[in-house]
Amino acid sequence: MMVESASETIRSAPSSQNGVGSLSGQADGSGGGGATGTTASGTGRDVTTGTDSNGEMSPAELLHFQQQQALQVARQFLLQQASGLSSPGNNDSKQSASAVQVPVSVAMMSPQMLTPQQMQQILSPPQLQALLQQQQALMLQQLQEYYKKQQEQLHLQLLTQQQAGKPQPKEALGNKQLAFQQQLLQMQQLQQQHLLNLQRQGLVSLQPSQASGPLQTLPQASPVSPTAAVCPTDLPQLWKGEGAPGQPAEDSVKQEGLDLTGTAATATSFAAPPKVSPSLSHHTLPNGQPTVLTSRRDSSSHEETPGSHPLYGHGECKWPGCETLCEDLGQFIKHLNTEHALDDRSTAQCRVQMQVVQQLEIQLAKESERLQAMMAHLHMRPSEPKPFSQPLNPVPDSSSFSKVTVSAADSFPDGLVHPPTSAAAPVTPLRPPGLGSASLHGGGPARRRSSDKFCSPISSELAQNHEFYKNADVRPPFTYASLIRQAILETPDRQLTLNEIYNWFTRMFAYFRRNTATWKNAVRHNLSLHKCFVRVENVKGAVWTVDEREYQKRRPPKMTGSPTLVKNMISGLSYGALNASYQAALAESSFPLLNSPGMLNPGSTSSLLPLSHDDVGAPLEPLSSNGSSSPPRLSPPQYSHQVQVKEEPAEAEEDRQPGPSLGAPNPSASGPPEDRDLEEELPGEELS
DNA sequence: AGCTTGATAAACACTT
DNA sequence: AAAGTGTTTATCAAGC
């Protein structure tokens, strides 16, 4: 089931396209494609270590390893601290293996056909970027393989010459060697570049400590799902560079490769600055294959085996949902290129995988933090926590997040938010709602579905990706209703005139700076149509307020109780990727993780998922089903006040309400937890 | 297949 | 009269 749901989500997003979307007229699809990077992965350090010396270790493995490392690192770090060890050098294969078990989630995803547009919808720009990066990684692997071969050939040549024909003048030999070395150097540089790119994009670099960071970010699980995963921030770059989603990763690679500027530096610093080159050169030259590699290999091979491709093991393709049997690596490679090329499906799958990884990372971070706390408590290690804790801490407050993100972004020239190298990364990755997609289609109905429903915490989402939406002509993955609500809630008095709402739209979203007639009409339509929006006559004129209760009501009544539903929901959500098992694990251990950032709610525990209120929000609530505006019955205390407004826009009444949609006068001091959550969402503060 | 929800389009009424 | 604001109806698409 989980699987199904997940797939559903994915599917949903896209399809619409057809002309429907008029909203924008199409925003275009350009954006797409990309991939983003956020994924998260790994650290670069290992790279250094091993890489290539050993002919055996394929580049692919390396990459894979790196990714895995992201997870491992954190763990290792912890362990080391605990034990007092400091030598980073030795990694245990075990760890890596364990850390990476992500595949599970993958399983959830069933391969589905997605159109590029769909992909975009589903994926947030950052996600797209991540995908691209993944593609890049693949290419890199191939490239590395190629280089490796070349290297081997050279090596052979050298040997041959040396052995057989001593006749050659020393000088000649020397030249050859020189040439060889140069070649190696080039190769190394190339590799480095790629690595840097990857790191920069977040693919590779997560420092141990930082790795944890992201975790927290996970917003509440908002349903945002698909989209959610990567941070939009990353996108910008991508988008700029690549117009079409479908574009080959190569381009991006090239581009990025060239400009590893500051960003790269950042990433690098963390990851392992030294990087590969040095080690590589040494190892490669002489036949010496560093032992290091071997060990590494083991770890990575764990699952993959000898084939030496992360996605190939036990004779079959390990691509999520694939399992195609391939006799040898060559066949597998072919299969990989044909069946898992850069298409919608692959992209979607990558996205899911990314999410899985992110979730795992988050969990790891949390657990690590806990462990540290425990150890600290037990006097094992007084000082330790820093690394992990740092990243984590920021999370709690969504606003802070946004800030972080932004700042990071700011540092970049393009003004767009970029993949957070480290600190920021955590945040972003998760959430960008599927918007990225928006760019693609421009607007069809699909968007809303995927977006709104699944991505709930609009506020946190917006907060985090504020800059992105502001600058990118991407249709936000939220429904008009949720956007309107957000606009209203963001204001101190929780009320806005129609014109102010318009302004908010244009201010917050580049997308709404055009096709005004269309979306304005939609806004008006939504205001009138939904009971949750209450018109209040004001001195100046009319203002619109939000009746939270109504707003929550309109959500999926289904969610209300049944665990099953909830589950499905979850799976469907962005995090859908997470499989049940993972969730279960979280629940067991520390599920607070999920709640993380955006949710301020203290009491959130109840809400299993962070599903946020926004769209899903009400799930747990009793309100549920009665769509009618009937009396507040079970009403959550908080909203009670706002209730019937629509029917009777009593002006006076309304006027007062505005401010507090939250702070209502409600008597019941102790609102049910659920309510609490809901409330949390409301606060517009999050947004920025 | 039917229902619900959301987006979009458009007609219309009312107000400024 | 024109523009803005609200309301309402209809259609289409997607999800359940």
Image (tube, coloured by chain):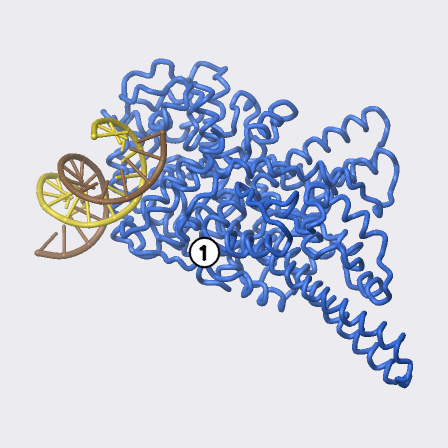
Chain colours: A blue, B yellow, C brown
Q: Chain of mark 1?
A: A
- Looking at the image, is A249 positioned above or below residue A402? below
Residue under label 1, please give it. A32
Say left or right for C7 vs A607.
left
Q: Residue at x 45, y 29 (%)?
A: A569
Percent of width and height locating residue A178: 82, 78
Task: Report the front residue among A46 and A480.
Answer: A46
Q: Residue A89: in sight, yes or no?
A: yes
Asked whether A2 or A301 is in front, the reply is A301
User: Callout 1: helix, strand or loop?
Assistant: loop
Q: Is residue A40 above or below residue A598?
A: below
- Which residue is pictured at 48% across the width and 61% down the height? A247
Q: What amino acid type is highlighted by mark number 1?
A: Gly
- Which residue is nearer to you in this view: A649 or A671? A671
- Which residue is at a point 83% across and 51% down the rendered structure image? A292
Above or below — where is A207 with respect to A492? Answer: below
Q: Quadrant of residue A590?
A: top right
Residue A250, quarter of the rendered image: bottom right
For image coordinates 30% across by 37% down, the residue present is A543
